[in-house]
Image (cartoon, grey):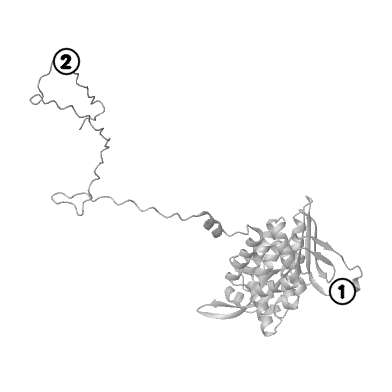
Amino acid sequence: MENALAKMPSTGNAIASYLGDDAIRKNIEKVVSGKNADRFITSIVSAVQANPQLATCTNQSILSSALMGESLQLPPSPQLGYYYMVPYKTKKKIGKEMVEIQEAQFQMGWKGMIQLAIRSGQYKNIVVNEIKEGEIDYNPITEDIVLHPIKDPAEREKAKTIGYYAAFELMSGFKKQMFSPIEALEAHAQKYSKTYQSDKKYGNRRSTWSTNFDAMAKKTMIRLLLSKWGIMSVEMQQAYINDMGVINEDGTVRYVDNTPQTIEEQVQEDISANANSQSFEDVIDAEVVDVPKEEPAPQPEKPRRGRPPKNPTPAPVPVPLVTPTPTPVPSPLVVDDLVPETPAAEEEVEPEVSFAAVPEWE
């Protein structure tokens, strides 16, 4: 019965009955104790009665969104603008059937984000505001900003809004400021909000971007500035994680206005904006050099036992080093039979022939 009540569309009386159930009240008192439980229940009933569309949402999604706001110690009053419970149509499996229902999405307001930042004790000053035509000189490369504010409030109110500006100063003295043209915020809204895409396509006004562009633009500026450059307390991190999500009964978050693919794209966009601009794959490709492998020299086939090898490669024959042989000196020819003896004369000495220069044959 309790689960059936949670899935039923809510009205002012229905949500009061649901929150008054003993089991539901015990769960509330685990988060909100004492007299605060009565205050909490009263504030939820008032918020539902003030918003007819919220009254069509499931009781469980309304309670979960309100409990998230209470855990951050932010009141659910839409007049204060700290956070909102925004109705969204979605499909959910009830039993064996997929039923189209309305669920309340937890959505932080820009005032709530500033409240959490101030509570952390780290921020000396936080500013977010629209920029009128002629009020800013902006260098998109160095991000240097020079402001020329219009001093007359009436004149400034009439001037055209061209973008939004956000800045903070920490207690340590660190300062950071950023500016975004209105066209960039418009593109951001159409990229990350399915409801706003539908509004632009069909001319509806169901998205908060359509009904209150100024508030959503300021929230986006604060969110981007603090998440990239500021100090994030535990409360701020919790608010950022659950922002724009439907809180389930087990505490998990479903982003009904964003597909998982869109959320992954947003994460990649944040990484690209803050990390090294060179992709990891490019770095790897730049370090790898393809070196052609040298083919091994052909080896002679080893002879198999019992048969000669195929196409044996003859062993190289060493070429002997040949030293030129000097022409030997011919020995004198002596013919004793033909030459008669002559009177004794001086004995002729046969010339010596030296064979020292003749190499010895191997």
Q: Name the one closer to the observer, 285 or 332.
A: 332
The image shows residue 302, relative to residue 248, as above or below, that is above
Q: Nearer the viewer, residue 78 or 318?
A: 318
Residue 157, numbered circle: 1
Quadrant in the picture for the N terminus: bottom right
Q: Are marks 2 and 1 in contact (CB under 8 Å)?
A: no
Q: Label 1: how many residues lie within 10 Å, few (<14), some (14-19) or many (20+)?
A: few
- Secondary structure of residue under mark 2: loop
Structural crowding at the residue carrying mark 2, measured as other residues with C-alpha within 10 Å and reported as few (<14), some (14–19) or many (≥20): few
Q: Secondary structure at mark 1?
A: helix
Horizontal side of residue 326 vs 86, given as left or right: left
Q: Residue at x 67, y 63 (%)?
A: 240
Disc 2 residue type (three-letter)? Ala
The tag on residue 353 is none
Label 2 – label 1 distance at C-alpha = 153 Å
Q: Residue furthest front?
A: 343
Extreme right residue here? 152
The amino acid type, in three-letter code, at marker 1 is Glu
Which residue in the structure is indicated by mark 2? Answer: 345
